[in-house]
Image: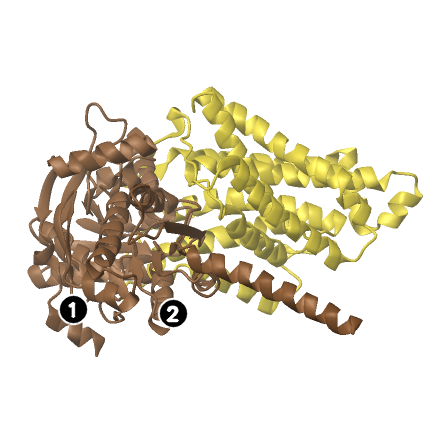
Chain colours: A brown, B yellow
């Protein structure tokens, strides 16, 4: 009899304990979890910090007014150190262990493709925030991946539009030897050849990602005497190359184009030591266009973070507006409904209305092309002679996307 | 298509000179590694991290003085000494207890230090990379023919032989150098004739790490000072030491020359595949002389 009663009592205690555990968890609303995998170490962090900071700014605002559909939003970040294996492991941890509802990231195109592949299998929406490979929404695009940044096809077309107007005929291509480097070089060159058939490619130089010393490459390129150079560097290589260009006087001997050369993230760390006369394309400037929306955005960002927003901030802002706007429209936290609502959605942004094209999940961002120059009142260089190229003029046609995805 | 397309004499001379200035940095770092390897028989994987710490320290000291010319020279003087101090503490505190153990242990120990140093750098300096500017009179470039040659590379070309000469003097003409060479060949005998081998090892280790710090300090104005620096340099340094002959400083010079020159000339001759050239050279050397080009001390 004693045994039975001890058994019964312990059973009763366990039952009550379980109730205590189960009931609170069903009352407390789980937060909506959003994971960001990106490179926060080394040179690329100058681009990626703004994405995370602007996104967190929007999240903080939403959380303060009750969250999204009654649920608070939690942002989890992981550092990929610009390595695919580390980043993919982090993404897996966020999806399998933390059960994030949405993944965002990253600046490394190779990593973005790997995460996109995983998200397709796991049916987790992935918003690409900085990687510019056109394969992300092109050949390898699918239902669960969105891009809120321009890609090499768009940037290439915009750059070609600008370069075709210049008198240069003999080109040299040089860049970081990885997915993005080759993609942006191909994007610019294919479109340039279409617009100006008599351009000639004298040669190409490709260095490993993270190459520290460009001097031998620069001297080799100069000995070939091209009219202009297309520099295809990515997050890790842009700033070191510009520094080497200034140190060797490369920018004074031959004009060169580098995508993102005119961006704040690229020019601010170099200060007044940045090279002048570099042709660059970008998605965002805090000083142009001087619209009310842009000024307000800059003011809010500066108030929280004490620095001017760079293009990453625009991407972080867009991500927040698309994700939470779509949830709001859907009325429920559901992955498939989120995707249905983001497709074709437009948001107001500091660069105007940006629409997410439904077919390939690519945001139609405008491109700005300019030339770096010193300016009074700033201790870094800014872009001058800015030309705006609207988003829909540089998007690849839906037929081209269909053909790529076959 | 682009093979040897732009090889003019001027361009070749240009590339050779640039390659030689790269050789300087590679030689300084590899010679330190070779010294430690030859005398202490420790493959110091943390050598690259000390190089990185040297670069970061140079940045900090130079920036303290507003990145002026005097700040740079002071940093060049002090940063390698700082690295030498760190290595002294590590050696006396931890390494000296492990000399009796097998090599694998020492290798793993230095490897763990490279990881620790890597994160220490991230803790102290943050994950942002740093940018240092050379003093004004070393900035810019002058023309050889019609091609630019950066002034700082010329500075490196002068420093290289100076360091090589200094090392030669140290190992051949000073007492500590002769003792170190003896200890490399037969440490038991050196101990048997009454010399404190432990202090010899400490001295050699500190000098080797000073060289790593010096390499880092010299390279600081030419490239971004970032977290990945240690990984790139340690692979190159080990390859140079291996093809030169383990423990042989002149081998390190030869290896650095081969590495630096094949790299820069390869960039001129076949730019698309330039990355491959130095490693192809290493493979070629090892195929014909697996023990290295010059005699090793092992």
Q: Is residue B205 left or right of residue A14?
A: right
Q: Secondary structure at mark 2?
A: helix
> Which numbered disc covers residue A244?
none
- Assess whether mark 1 and mark 2 are in contact (beta carbons under 8 angstroms): no
Instruction: Please report whichever mark, 2 or 1, sits nearer to the chain's N-terminal start.
Output: 2
Does A385 sit above or below residue A390?
Answer: above
Check the picture and name the quadrant holding the N terminus of chain A: bottom right
The residue depicted at 84 percent of the width and 41 percent of the height is B197
Q: For mark 2, name the chain.
A: A
- Residue B5 visible within the image: no
Q: For mark 1, name the chain.
A: A
Check the picture and name the quadrant holding the C terminus of chain A: bottom left
Can you give x and y, in whole percent of width and height, for residue A184 in the image? Answer: 24, 58
Quarter of the rendering containing residue A15: bottom right
Q: Is residue B61 left or right of residue B110?
A: left
The residue depicted at 74 percent of the width and 52 percent of the height is B41
How crowded is the residue under tag 2: few (<14 C-alpha within 10 Å), some, or many (20+)? some
Among all residues in the image, which is located at the extreme front?
A1
Q: Is residue A243 left or right of residue B240?
A: left
The residue depicted at 46 percent of the width and 66 percent of the height is A96
Does A122 sit above or below residue B66?
Answer: below
Can you give x and y, in whole percent of width and height, for residue B16 in the image? Answer: 42, 48
Can you give x and y, in whole percent of width and height, for residue B252 in the image? Answer: 61, 50
Disc count in the image? 2
- Residue A304 visible within the image: yes
> Which numbered disc covers residue A359?
1
Instruction: Pick whichever, A278 or A134, lies toward us.
Output: A134
Q: Which residue in the structure is indicated by mark 2?
A: A118
How crowded is the residue under tag 1: few (<14 C-alpha within 10 Å), some, or many (20+)? some
Q: Secondary structure at mark 1?
A: loop
How far is disc 2 from disc 1 in space, using C-alphas? 21 Å
């Amino acid at each position: 009899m004693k045994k039975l009663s001890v058994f019964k009592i312990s059973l009763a205690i366990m039952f009550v304990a379980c109730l205590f555990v189960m009931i609170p968890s069903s009352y407390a609303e789980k937060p909506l979890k959003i994971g960001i995998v990106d490179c926060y170490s080394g040179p690329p962090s100058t681009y990626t910090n703004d994405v995370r900071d602007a996104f967190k700014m929007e999240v903080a605002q939403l959380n303060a007014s009750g969250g999204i559909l009654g649920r608070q939003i939690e942002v989890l970040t992981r550092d990929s150190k610009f390595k695919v294996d580390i980043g993919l492991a982090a993404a897996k941890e966020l999806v399998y262990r933390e059960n994030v509802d949405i993944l965002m990231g990253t600046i490394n195109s190779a990593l973005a493709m790997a995460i996109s592949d995983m998200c397709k299998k796991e049916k987790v929406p992935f918003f690409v925030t900085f990687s510019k490979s056109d394969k992300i929404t092109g050949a390898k695009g699918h239902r669960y991946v969105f891009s809120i940044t321009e890609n090499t096809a768009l940037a290439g077309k915009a750059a070609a539009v600008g370069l075709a107007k210049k008198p240069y005929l003999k080109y040299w291509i040089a860049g970081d030897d990885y997915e993005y480097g080759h993609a942006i070089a191909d994007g610019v060159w294919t479109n340039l050849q279409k617009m100006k058939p008599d351009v000639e490619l004298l040669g190409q130089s490709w260095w490993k990602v993270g190459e520290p010393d460009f001097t031998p490459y620069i001297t080799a390129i100069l000995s070939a005497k091209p009219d202009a150079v297309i520099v295809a560097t990515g997050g890790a290589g842009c700033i070191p190359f510009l520094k080497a260009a200034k140190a060797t006087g490369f920018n004074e001997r031959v004009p060169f184009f580098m995508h993102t050369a005119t961006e704040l993230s690229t020019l601010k760390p170099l200060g007044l030591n940045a090279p002048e006369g570099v042709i660059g394309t970008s998605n965002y400037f805090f000083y142009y266009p001087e619209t009310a929306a842009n000024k307000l955005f800059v003011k809010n960002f500066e108030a929280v973070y004490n620095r001017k927003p760079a293009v990453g901030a625009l991407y972080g802002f867009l991500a927040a507006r698309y994700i939470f706007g779509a949830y709001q429209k859907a009325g429920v936290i559901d992955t498939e409904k989120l995707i249905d609502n983001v497709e074709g959605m437009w948001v107001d942004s500091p660069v105007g209305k940006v629409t997410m094209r439904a077919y390939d999940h690519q945001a139609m961002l405008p491109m700005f092309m300019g030339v770096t120059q010193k300016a009074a009142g700033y201790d870094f260089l800014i872009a001058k002679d800015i030309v705006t190229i609207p988003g829909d003029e540089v998007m690849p046609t839906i037929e081209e996307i269909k053909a790529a995805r076959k | 298509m682009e093979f040897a397309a732009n090889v003019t004499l001027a361009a070749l001379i240009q590339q050779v000179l640039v390659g030689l200035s790269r050789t300087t940095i590679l030689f300084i770092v590899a010679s330190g590694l070779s010294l430690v390897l030859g005398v202490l028989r420790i493959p110091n994987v943390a050598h690259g991290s000390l190089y990185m710490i040297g670069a970061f320290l140079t940045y900090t000291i130079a920036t303290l003085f507003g990145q002026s010319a005097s700040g740079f020279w002071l940093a060049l003087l002090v940063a390698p000494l700082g690295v030498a101090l760190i290595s002294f503490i590590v050696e006396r505190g931890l390494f000296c207890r492990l000399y009796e153990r097998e090599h694998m242990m020492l290798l793993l120990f230095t490897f763990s230090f490279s990881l620790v140093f890597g994160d220490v750098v991230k803790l102290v300096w943050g994950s942002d990379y740093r940018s240092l500017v050379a003093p004004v009179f070393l900035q810019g470039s002058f023309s050889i023919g019609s091609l630019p040659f950066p002034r700082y590379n010329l500075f490196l070309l002068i420093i290289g032989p100076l360091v090589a000469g200094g090392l030669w003097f140290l190992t051949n003409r000073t007492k500590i150098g002769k003792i170190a060479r003896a200890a490399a060949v037969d440490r038991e005998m050196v101990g048997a004739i009454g010399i404190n081998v432990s202090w010899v090892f400490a001295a050699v280790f500190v000098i080797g790490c000073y060289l790593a710090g010096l390499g880092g300090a010299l390279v600081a104005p030419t490239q971004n000072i970032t977290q990945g620096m240690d990984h790139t340099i340690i692979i190159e340094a080990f390859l140079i030491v291996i093809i030169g002959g383990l423990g042989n400083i002149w081998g390190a010079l030869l290896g650095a020359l081969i590495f630096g020159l094949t790299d820069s000339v390869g960039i001129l001759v076949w730019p698309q595949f330039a990355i491959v050239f130095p490693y192809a050279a290493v493979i070629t050397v090892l195929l014909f002389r697996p023990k290295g080009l010059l005699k090793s001390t092992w």
